[in-house]
Image (cartoon, grey):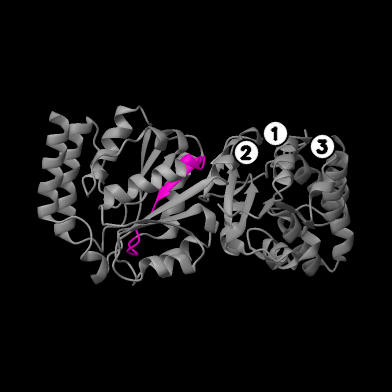
């Protein structure tokens, strides 16, 4: 993937402290009560900074006076700040690969700089955006703080990964158009309230950061294409939002139109079959190329425009996290509102046939949106040249012990893509091909 910038949350992600935020709230509450502010106006102090703004507006007490108490408490807490395991190694990993880094935090600038300097990691970051650096409306979960970093560094949001430990970080990343990675098991430094949000990726602790990044940074996309001049340009435009040109492999399967010319104009890697070998032949060529290049993950993505790039990211998730070796994007488990009945029925029949040979049921065995780990891709031996390859891949994955995950995706059909893919006749051919192959 083309990740050029990693934006880290601070508290609960990079650093922790023994004192919990709930204790800070209690101490702040007591200090406010000592100033004569009534309990009803203080409320539950969630979130603290914005609550102080409201108290200032309603009482006339200068905001700076109230805010200075919070800053004092935050800085005092950071005197015992420590790095979570894996953080220093992760920062070194990113620096060695030329990936820029920034910190976005709801903490005060004074407390953030103190923590970064105390833990010895301040020098890794190009930009630090604390809460005082933006209007309150732009604080997380708004994407304003992240957008500030992107503007300063000139990095597109799609090339940015936001790493945090809270739903606010995930929502802020989404609002800014960036990818998100949630650290789920850090306790020290976690905010005193939770917000549910679904990240693009997640890891238990920062000790798992490097293995995931190694997979993400070595992800190849294989795009089998036969006479796809109408759609290949838009498909590559979408893929290039998140992947480097050298990671995208178009297998031009003997096309007689401008497919190869258009693909090459995008600067991606193009492999050409002199004759049409079929989907199986194209996928075999693409997977073999990615494996030779040392791919840690390989995604297959159809060239006819029926896949969404957002769904590709979802299908990558379990493999990137190390929870699966092979993931299939299942249209049958997702939004099927655009999927014609004949397609649903045909897929059901082919899924049943595939399950007979694989001894495992996969709800959308014919899906063209898949993700393999590098190890699993290397074990897949493709012998079927045409559409039977989709079933063959499932059979091969099961035979080789690859852990399989199914990920719901949206079924996208246009008049153009409806003319592609399997039909009843192809289904019969697939069944016969699998039978003959089994009897060899």
Cβ atoms under marks 1 and 2 closer than 8 Å: yes
Badge 2 is on which residue?
A: 209
- Seen at 26% across and 45% down, the residue is 390
Locate residue 411, reporting x and y percent.
Answer: 30, 59
Q: Secondary structure at mark 3?
A: loop
How many residues crowd around disc 2 within 10 Å: few (fewer than 14), some, or many (20 or more)?
Answer: many
Q: Nearer the viewer, mark 2 or mark 3?
A: 2
Q: Earlier in the sequence, mark 1 or mark 3?
A: 3
Q: Secondary structure at mark 1?
A: loop
How many residues crowd around disc 3 within 10 Å: few (fewer than 14), some, or many (20 or more)?
Answer: many
How many residues crowd around disc 1 within 10 Å: few (fewer than 14), some, or many (20 or more)?
Answer: some
Which residues fall within the magenta stretch? 292-306
User: Would residue 376 be visible to someone looking at this image?
Assistant: yes
State whether residue 62 is above or below residue 125: below
State whether residue 133 is above or below residue 213: below
- Seen at 13% across and 42% down, the residue is 431
How many labels were placed on the picture? 3
- Residue 86 circle label: 1
Q: Is residue 422 left or right of residue 208?
A: left
Q: Nearer the viewer, mark 1 or mark 3?
A: 1
State whether residue 44 is above or below residue 131: above
Q: Is residue 438 left or right of residue 410?
A: left
Q: Quadrant of residue 403?
A: top left
Identify which residue, 257 or 9, lies in the foreground. 257
Q: Earlier in the sequence, mark 1 or mark 2?
A: 1
- Seen at 10% across and 47% down, the residue is 428
Locate residue 191, reporting x and y percent.
Answer: 68, 45
* Quadrant showing the C terminus: top left
Q: Earlier in the sequence, mark 2 or mark 3?
A: 3
Q: Please, what is the dominant secondary structure of the magenta stretch?
A: loop
Membership of 304 in magenta stretch: yes
Badge 3 is on which residue?
A: 81
């Amino acid at each position: 993937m083309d990740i050029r910038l990693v934006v880290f949350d601070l508290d609960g992600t990079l650093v922790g402290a023994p004192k919990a935020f709930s204790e800070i709230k209690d101490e702040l509450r007591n200090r406010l009560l000592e100033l004569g502010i009534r309990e009803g106006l203080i409320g539950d102090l969630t979130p603290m900074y914005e609550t102080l703004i409201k108290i200032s507006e309603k009482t006339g007490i200068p905001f700076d006076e109230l805010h200075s108490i919070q800053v004092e408490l935050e800085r005092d807490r950071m005197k015992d700040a420590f790095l979570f395991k894996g953080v220093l190694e992760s920062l070194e990993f990113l620096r060695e690969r030329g990936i820029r880094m920034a910190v976005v935090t709801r903490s005060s600038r004074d407390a953030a700089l103190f923590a970064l300097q105390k833990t010895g990691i301040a020098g890794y970051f190009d930009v630090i955006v604390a809460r005082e650096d933006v209007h309150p409306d732009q604080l997380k979960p708004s994407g304003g703080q992240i957008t500030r970093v992107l503007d300063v560094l000139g990095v597109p949001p799609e090339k940015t990964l936001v790493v945090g430990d809270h739903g606010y970080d995930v929502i802020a990343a989404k609002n800014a158009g960036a990818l998100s990675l949630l650290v789920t098991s850090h306790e020290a430094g976690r905010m005193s309230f939770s917000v549910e949000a679904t990240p693009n990726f997640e890891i238990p602790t920062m000790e798992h950061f490097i293995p995931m990044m190694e997979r993400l940074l070595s992800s190849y996309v294989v795009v089998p294409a036969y006479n796809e001049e109408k759609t290949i340009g838009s498909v590559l435009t979408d893929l290039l939002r998140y992947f480097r040109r050298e990671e995208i492999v178009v297998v031009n399967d003997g096309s007689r139109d401008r497919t190869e010319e258009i693909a090459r104009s995008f600067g991606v890697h193009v492999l050409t079959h002199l004759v049409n070998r079929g989907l199986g032949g194209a996928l075999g060529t693409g997977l073999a190329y990615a494996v030779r290049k040392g791919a840690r993950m390989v995604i297959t993505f159809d060239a006819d425009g029926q896949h969404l790039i957002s769904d590709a990211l979802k299908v990558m998730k379990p493999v990137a996290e190390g929870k699966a070796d092979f993931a299939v994007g299942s249209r049958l488990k997702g939004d099927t509102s655009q999927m014609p009945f004949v397609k649903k029925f045909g897929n059901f029949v082919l899924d049943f046939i595939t399950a007979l040979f694989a001894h495992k049921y996969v709800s959308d065995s014919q899906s063209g949106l898949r993700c393999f780990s590098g190890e699993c891709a290397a074990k897949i031996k493709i012998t079927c040249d045409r559409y039977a390859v989709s079933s063959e891949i499932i059979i091969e994955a099961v035979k080789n012990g690859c852990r399989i995950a199914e990920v719901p995706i949206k079924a996208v059909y246009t008049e153009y893509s409806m003319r592609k893919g399997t039909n009843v006749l192809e289904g019969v051919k697939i069944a016969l091909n699998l039978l003959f192959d089994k009897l060899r």
